[in-house]
Amino acid sequence: MKTVLLLLSALSFSSRSGSCAPSSCRLPPSQWCSSLDSAVQCGVLKECLQSNFTRSHQTADPVLVELYYESLCPGCRLFLTEMLFPTWLLLNEIMNVNLVPYGNAVEKPDGQKYIYECQHGKEECLGNMIETCLLNMTKAAFPIIFCMESSQDVIKSAKSCVELYSPQLSWDKVMSCVNGDLGNQLMHQNAMKTNALKPPHNYVPWVTINGEHTDDLQDKAQVSLFTLVCNMYKVQLIMVISYIYIYIYIYIYIYIYIYIYIYIYIYIYIYIYIYIYIYIIFFFFFFFFFFFWGFLDLNQQLLFMK
Ligand SMILES: *[C@@H]1O[C@H](CO)[C@@H](O)[C@H](O)[C@H]1NC(C)=O
Ligand SMILES: *[C@@H]1O[C@H](CO)[C@@H](O)[C@H](O)[C@H]1NC(C)=O
């Protein structure tokens, strides 16, 4: 998600400054903000600092949308391609998506491994497995899964979708995950996650928002996920902001009390010192006064006596 963000922001900078980055800049746009040096070399320091600042001050956590689905169910494909993916494209800064391809499948232990039966047959199990492996192997999994689910044939399109969105990922690697232990183990994790749902799912696509599922949330997600995510984020933001205000008030009060105490102590010390000095001065004054006065008086008496 962060890399997509970085990419988008970098792209917007590159379009703003045209395609003429200084010649000392040999990095692709996605890495211009990766360090202070590269930002200076590519002449985008101000933009990088600004985008870093706004990103670090994005206080509320993103809304977590999880989709429990299966690769060939028509309702799932519709929700994923027409609702979830477009919303994520628009709101990926404030929303995280977690896909769990398993749905109504059933697993049976078979020695160390598991055997799966899927609602729409073997093809669907294969689709679920490919998507599960992709989710583990590449950050571009969501666009690839969107590409598959929006194609005529989910399975046949998989290879070209991977080549399109993640050219560096080899298809053979994906298939060795699909047919190997890793895929089997990852699918078992999906099964455990799906079976642990509270309330348990009784249809697919099954949506949870921040880990919670209610009929109301599901309806709102299917009518307009965009509105739902925005509203949830606003609520979270307001809570975060009110917490920040409460903290600020507490700090202000603590500081005020500390300052008041410090001033009171300083005044008390000053008064004590002043009183001590005054006493000392008076003491010496009277001491010398009486001493000299007595001395003079004695002298006079002595003079008289003469
Ligand atoms: C932007 O933030 C990233 C990580 O948060 C950091 O590595 C990078 O140095 C920052 N870039 C600038 C120009 O400060
Ligand atoms: C992929 O799956 C393995 C095994 O479960 C796990 O250790 C690893 O963290 C996963 N990687 C990602 C990116 O999810």
Image (cartoon, rainbow, N blue to C red):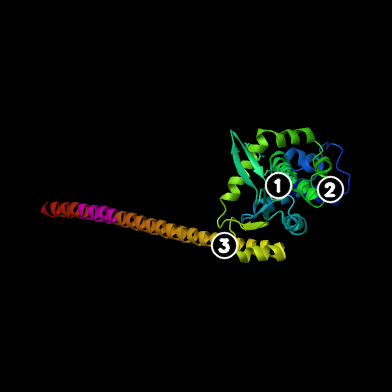
Q: Residues within 10 Å of mark 2 (few under 14, many from 20)?
A: some
- Crowd rating for badge 1 (residues with CA inside 10 Å; few <14, some 14–19, many 20+): few
Q: Nearer the viewer, residue 56 or 183?
A: 183
Q: Secondary structure at mark 1?
A: helix
Q: Which residues are magenta?
A: 279-291
Between circles 3 and 2, the one closer to the viewer is 3
Cβ–Cβ below 8 Å for labels 3 and 2? no
Closer to the N terminus: mark 3 or mark 2?
2
The amino acid type of the residue labelled 2 equals Ser
Mark 1 or 2: in front is 1
| Residue at 17%, 51% in the rendered image | 299
Identify which amino acid the numbered label 1 is placed on: Lys
Confirm whether residue 170 shows in the render: no
Counting other residues with Cα less than 10 Å from the Cα at mark 3, is it few (<14), some (14-19), or many (20 or more)?
few
Residue 148 appears left or right of 256? right
Instruction: Report the number of numbered marks.
Output: 3
22 relative to 237, above or below = above
- Of mark 1 and mark 2, the one earlier in the sequence is 1
Residue topped by disc 3: 239
Q: Residue at x 70, y 47 (%)?
A: 2
Q: Which residue is mark 1?
A: 2
Q: Secondary structure at mark 2?
A: helix
Locate residue 248, reporting x and y percent. 53, 60
Q: Nearer the viewer, residue 76 or 45?
A: 76
